[in-house]
Image (cartoon, rainbow, N blue to C red):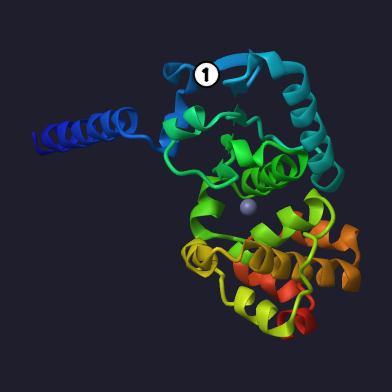
Amino acid sequence: MIRDILNAIVAGATIFMLGLALEIPNPYRALAPGLFGLTEVAPRIYTDAPARTAELTRMVVKAEENSRRFFGKTPAQPTYIICTEPKCEQIFGALPNGLTMGFHRVILSPAGVNQLVLNHERIHVDLHALMGLNGLRLQRYPAWFDEGLSEYLAGPPRPGYRPTVADKRAVLRAGGFAQWNSLVQDGQYNRHYGAARALVADIAKKIGRAQLREIVLESKTRAEFMSRLPQSVLNP
Ligand SMILES: [Zn+2]
């Protein structure tokens, strides 16, 4: 009986949340992009610009190849939602240039429809797939590494920013996603993402990409991961 009541409450709450997801603009709508007028122009690629199918498909293929060069083959098969117009972005609420949800959805806003942003998000996808839902919940890799690796593997550094020790130290304190979000709330994206990228570049320079890859693939816990990174980079 109690279990029935609990089940009913859980079911009710789920339906309520689903209702909210459909009613109010928010990223969870990405779970059902077809409901909001986006077209699936290729397998797992939704967009408001079917005329740009060839270009967008090419970008996705390139981003997947770029990520595979580091990770090798990964199990991730995300759905891409590419908004080229503000009207499409508004469906999902206020979006950053790119957003990765778990390892299941990548959403690009009009400002983020470019190869670098797509590369960045795809790296997130593969890193997240590697840790799985439980690893994500426990945040096996610190947020600064998640962002720094995505920046580092996506392409060249952002122009006009020179990493400083103070910036690196600030970024190193952002181990959790909530801490990262509050760090970047000042809107100084080039600075924070640039410093996170610089830390990962420092690590790669010190131990090489192959060993970095090995540590990423093999570490089972955050503590193990952190202990295998060069300590001099972690204490700038
Ligand atoms: Zn990111």
The N terminus is located in which quarter? Answer: top left
Lateral position of residue 3 relative to residue 62, left or right = left
Total numbered labels placed on residues in the image: 1
Residue toward you, 12 or 143: 143
Give the percent coordinates (x, y) of residue 20.
Answer: 28, 33
Question: Residue 81 location, x and y as percent?
Answer: 58, 29
Q: Position of residue 104 (x, y in %)?
A: 56, 35
Nearest the camera: 231 or 81? 81
Disc 1: CA contacts within 10 A as few (<14), some (14-19) or many (>=20): some
Q: Which residue shows up at 46% across the image and 63% down it?
A: 178
Foreground pick, 204 / 3: 204
Q: Which residue is mark 1?
A: 38
Residue found 57% across the figure and 44% down from its top:
99
Does residue 112 show up? Answer: yes
Which image quadrant for residue 56?
A: top right
Helix, strand or loop for disc 1: loop
Name the residue located 62 percent from the left edge and 41 percent from the top edge.
111
Q: Amino acid at mark 1?
A: Leu
Looking at the rendered image, the quarter that the C terminus falls into is bottom right
Instruction: Tell whether 95 sits left or right of 141.
Output: left
**Residue 128 location, x and y as percent?**
62, 47
For the point 27% across and 29% down, the residue is 19
User: In this rendering, is residue 29 above or below 52?
Assistant: below
Against 101, residue 41 (above or below) is above
Instruction: Residue lying at the far left in this picture: please name it.
Output: 1
Residue 142: tell me if it is visible. no
Q: Is residue 22 left or right of residue 195?
A: left
Queried on whether the Cβ of the residue with tag 1 lies below 8 angstroms from ligand 1, the answer reads no
- Judge from the rendering whether residue 177 lies leftward or rightward of residue 68; answer left or right: left
Question: Residue 94, relative to residue 230: is it above or below?
Answer: above
